[in-house]
Structure formats: C-alpha cells, structure tokens
Amino acid sequence: MHVAFVHRRGFGQFAALAAQLAQAGNEVSLITETIDQKIPAVRVVRHRAESGPRANPHMARHMGTPDHHARIGHRVAETFDAMARQGLVPDIVVGHIGWGSMMFLKDVLPRVPALGYCEFFYRSEGADIGFAPDDQPDLETRKRLRLRNIAQLLSLEAIEAGISPTHWQRSLYPADAQGRISVCHEGIDTARFRPDPTTSVKLSDGRVLRAGGPPIVTFVARDLEPYRGFPQVLEAAAKVVRQRPDALFVFVGGDGTSYGVPPPGGGAWKDHLLESLDIPRENIVFPGVVPHSVLRQLFQISAAHLYLTYPFVLSWSVLEAMACGALIIGSDTAPVREVIRTGRNGLLVPFFDADALAEAILDALRSPEHHVGMRAAARRTVERRFRLRDCLDRQQNILERMSGKSLIREGAVK
C-alpha cells in the first residue's frame, strides 16, 4: 500500500508509523516543508515553505493566520497534483490538520481516503486561553481564536476520519466531528524507556549524577516558559533547597517561547525569573536541549519528575518518564488527569500553587520508599495504554479499514 504523510515539520507524530510501514515494504511518502530526520525507503517531497502571517492593511482583522494556512494548503495540493501526474497517487493520506496542509486535499485527490491528525482545537474557554487568573480573553481574542480554526474546520469537513492522541484533546473538537475521531496515541517505546537504576549522567561541569546519590529532581519542556509551569517549578525549587540543600534540580529545555508570550522586556523566562528568586546556583542546572538518550537517563535517576502544563497538548516527555518508572508530580489539569491518578501512579497538585508543589517534592525526597508502588504503577499505565507496538497496530488497523487495502505488516513474508 502507498501511504502518504503530510506534516509541515518533517515526520513529527508520524515518525514511528512511517518507519514501520517502510521497513515492512509498503510505499511511503512524506510531503513537508522541512525535514527533521531521515527514514530509509521513505520518499520525501518538499514543497516551498510559506512565510508566516502577513501584515496587510486591506485584509480583514485576524485573517493573517487563516491566509497563511490557506497558502500552505495550496502548496500541498500543488504537490499532490504533481505527484498524481507522475502516477504517484497514494492509497491513503495521513496528515496534520492544524496548519492548513489538508485543506484542499479532496480537491486534488477526491477519491483517496484521508485521515487527519487532530491535535488541538482552539477555544476561548475550557482550554489554555483564560486558564491563568489574569488571562481573561476579550472579544478580539475570541474572534481571533475562532478564525484560527478555519483550516481545521474545512479539513474536518473533507476527511473521512481523524485521530487524537488523548481523549481530552479529542473532546475539544466540535461535537459533530468527535464521532469520526479515534483516540490513538503515537506510542511510547517501553523497551527503550524503562527503569534502570544503574545508569548515570555526566554534566558539562564534570559532575556525575546517579540514583542513590544526592536527590535529582527533573523538569523537561521544549522551552522553559509559563505554559509548562516553569515559574511555579522554579519557585518551588527555591523553597525545597532551603530544607534540602543536597537536592539538585535539572531543568531541561530551551530559552525560547513556544507557547504564550515572552517575559516583560523580552529575553528568556529563565533569566527573568532568576532575578527575583534567591536560589543557590549550585542547586540548579540548565543543560539546555539534550539528546533523547540523556533525557531517558535523567528520567531513570530522578527522585521526582515534575510535569506541569496548562490545559494543552500532553507532552510525550511525561509518558516517557512514567515508562522509566519516575515518580511524577504533575499539575491537576485535564490533560494530566487523563494519565495520572493522584496517589496511585503519581501525585497531582494545583497548577499555580508553588507551596503545594514544594511540599510534594519534599515528601518525595523524605520518604522515597513510600512511592515505589506509584513508580511501578506509572510504568504499567504506559504499558497498558501507550505501548508503541500496540499503538502502531491500532493505527495500521485504521489505515486498512479506511483504505480497504491490506498493509504489508512487520514480520510478514514479502
């Protein structure tokens, strides 16, 4: 079967599925702006990248983003049209619907079934916007958010089915579309992400971190910013080290702003927040963005792993940490509640309560033996609900059901 994936930033959420399909002998294509990795035997077709939203005085208010998404959709449609003229018509298309890439798919390939990746539907209530106490969306914000969903709404009207990685993310989509959206995560490699108390991590300053030594508390985000609770985590760290001067906090992530707004005056949130906090520098480490292998080792040696998030997309990192048997201390927000039951496979605290977070960390450091069962339960959660081979099997079943054709499966005789 010929499966074509569509994603602006390379393989993204489709990497494991694309790799397995190609390895088994299926024909696999990727239509993209940029490439994030190479997967053997996958045809990569790059279309011209469109510049971001344009300032145009003649354009209606808030139409910059919809215009940007429409331009991306045109590029993808042109790419599929060129492929079709060369006889490269896929049997099914799987694409992210958030950036407009799938908007015009049915206009160029009307008889090819399409599966949309439904990651996040923007809302002015019940999700990230309006979550912070000082964030009350005004009328212009509400209009902007509604228009930002244009590409997704047009894509939902055209595609046969969708997939969302979690139930909560699916719940954000319009009610009449949810019936066509299956919940299926991309999957976590539990053979790779597993407990290993013997591992160690060497820092750039020469220090070697390992389980059984001074307690390591980890925090991971694409960027260290408010959407992922970095201000509360840093404040909690300052409180913890006053009572536990042996504790070391490792904050993994970049200095940019992936979501939300930058700090007053610009720059990095890390630098902005450290100006007002009294925290010994020897108790905190900022290694920046680290290789995935180092991330895994940090999960394996952590006395506690902190995961806070606005009601937003659930990060892979928290599931990987759970698979490594880390003790998760997370925010009591909808995406986290879907995978963490406090007292069973982790601990939940109110998102904005740095005192409660600090106390939970101190309790974890005081009585690590009391949390052994939670660590084991966290891994079982991932094995039961997010194991990679199970998720890939569910995804392939969806592709076969939609296309009416059989995939070459891994291990099959070709």
Image (spheres, rainbow, N blue to C red):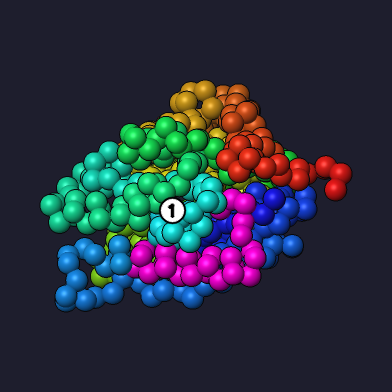
**Residue segment shown in magenta:** 68-93
To which quarter of the image does residue 84 belong? Answer: bottom right
Q: How many marks?
A: 1
Q: Which one is in front, 84 or 61? A: 84
Q: Which one is in front, 353 or 164? A: 164
To which quarter of the image does residue 67 belong? Answer: bottom left
| Disc 1 crowd, CA 10 A, few/some/many (<14, 14-19, 20+) | many
* Image position of 259 with respect to 244: above or below: below
Residue at the image point whose x is 32% and y is 39% from the top: 174
Tell me residue 248's x, y (percent): 53, 50
Q: Is residue 72 magenta?
A: yes
Which residue of the protein is positioned furthest toward the left in this rendering? 139
Q: Is residue 266 magenta?
A: no
Location of mark 1 (residue): 97
Q: Determine if residue 208 is in view.
A: no
Tell me residue 53's x, y (percent): 31, 70
SS category of the residue bearing label 1: loop
Q: Determine if residue 20 is in view.
A: yes
Q: Which one is in front, 349 or 59? A: 59
- Mark 1 residue type: Ile
Q: Which one is in front, 385 or 286? A: 385
Residue at the image point whose x is 42% and y is 64% from the top: 73
